[in-house]
Image: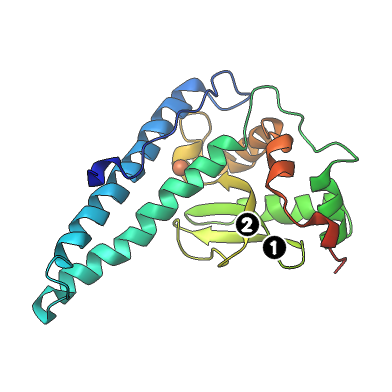
Amino acid sequence: MSFNQIYKARQFDLSGLTGISDETLEMHFKLYEGYVKETNNLTERISKFLQDGKVDQEEMPAYSELTRRLGFEYNGMVLHEYYFENMKRQGAGDPAPASAFRRAAEASFGSYETWKADFVGIGKMRGVGWAICYQNPSNGRLSNHWITLHETGNVSGFAPVLVMDVWEHAFLLDYKPAERPKYIEAFFSNIDWDVCDGRLTATSNAQAS
Ligand SMILES: [Fe+2]
């Protein structure tokens, strides 16, 4: 199998979102495709170091650099897929009262509003990265996290439930750099809460904090 075919860019039909232009999405899909391509490329280049069954000492600097970049590219690919997947045209804004997500947020934060205040607060943090709501599969608990770049801050083994890109490229064609709150508001109006409910795996075990 060709290394360039290990991962293929997925297609997302998202035109007509509220407050996030088709122009932004087209640019963003291209960026995402770059992460897919680079994940495949790095995997192939690293495999060449391994062809003789070992990593020679003189190969170590190049091998190390490529391997460090692999974490960035891999997470860049996967997080964009979660992000695009958890949006749809004419989203509902906030999750339905009886939805699995709302119940999990209430069990973990006391109320959905408190969960949202935390998630939106993280989205407004200065820096380059993501706001992600994860579920701990061992107890169903939700927690929100700031991810720097694509790879720093992800909690190992936790399942992403809601993923929001807050790199400036996600909104700069539609809003000014200081208008990130407006983009976050637009993002919420496009959330596909059914997808988020489907990502929850252990809500029945969720414990109030
Ligand atoms: Fe992005």
Task: Give the camera-side residue of 40 and 19.
Answer: 40
Residue furthest to the top in view is 16
Query: Under tag 1, what secondary structure?
Result: loop
The residue drawn where x is 79% and y is 37% is: 94
Q: Is residue 27 above or below residue 98?
A: above
Name the disc covering residue 159, or none. 2
* Residue 45 in view here: yes
Q: Is residue 104 above or below residue 85?
A: below
Q: Is residue 209 above or below residue 86?
A: below
The residue drawn where x is 49% and y is 57% is: 127
Q: How is the image coloured?
A: rainbow
For the residue marked with disc 1, what is the amino acid? Pro
Residue 138, image x, y percentages: 72, 68
Residue for badge 1: 137
Residue 196, image x, y percentages: 70, 43
Residue 148, image x, y percentages: 48, 60
Disc 2 crowd rating (10 Å Cα; few below 14, some 14-19, many 20+) is some
For the residue marked with disc 2, what is the amino acid? Ala
Q: What is the spatial separation of the Cα atoms under label 1 and label 2, in whole angstroms?
A: 7 Å
Query: Under tag 2, what secondary structure?
Result: strand
* Residue 124 in view here: no
Disc 1 crowd rating (10 Å Cα; few below 14, some 14-19, many 20+) is some
